[in-house]
Image (tube, rainbow, N blue to C red):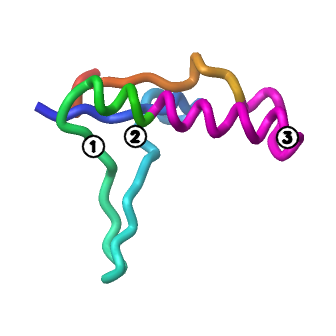
Amino acid sequence: MTYEVQTYTICDGWVNTWRIEHLDGTVEYETFATDAEAQAALDEFLDDLWDEITADQTHPEADDTDRYRVAKVGAP
């Protein structure tokens, strides 16, 4: 079982928008072995986002944490 970080989008609902781009040009969705690993990655992302907001590099509305969640891959 794998987990992913999902972002809520108006058009598609909850989707995995996190991608890994390889040197050979291929792209895949980023997944994690455990929900704890996915949550740690999301927490780090949100911390970085908050740093950008407080440095006036990103609009404060970007910190809508309800737009992100950790879910099992393939779960509705």
Which residue lies under the disc numbered 2? Answer: 16
Quadrant (top left/top right/bottom left/bottom right) for the N terminus: top left
Q: What is the quadrant of residue 46 in the picture?
A: top right
Residue closer to the observer: 9 or 16:
16
Q: What is the quadrant of residue 54 in the picture?
A: top right
Give SS at disc 1.
loop
Which amino acid type is shown beneath numbered disc 1? Thr
Residue 53, magenta (yes or no): yes
Which residue lies under the disc numbered 3? Answer: 55
Question: Which residue is rendered at x = 43% and y = 47% of the image?
Answer: 18
Is the residue under label 2 in contact with that under label 1 (CB below 8 Å)?
yes
Question: Which residue is rendered at x = 49% and y = 28% of the image?
Answer: 43
From the viewer's perspective, is 10 left or right of 43? right
Which marked residue is nearer to the observer: mark 3 or mark 2?
3
From the viewer's perspective, is 26 left or right of 53? left
Distance between mark 3 and mark 2 Cα atoms: 27 Å
Which amino acid type is shown beneath numbered disc 3? Ala
Judged by its main secondary structure, the magenta piece is helix
Residue closer to the observer: 9 or 47:
47
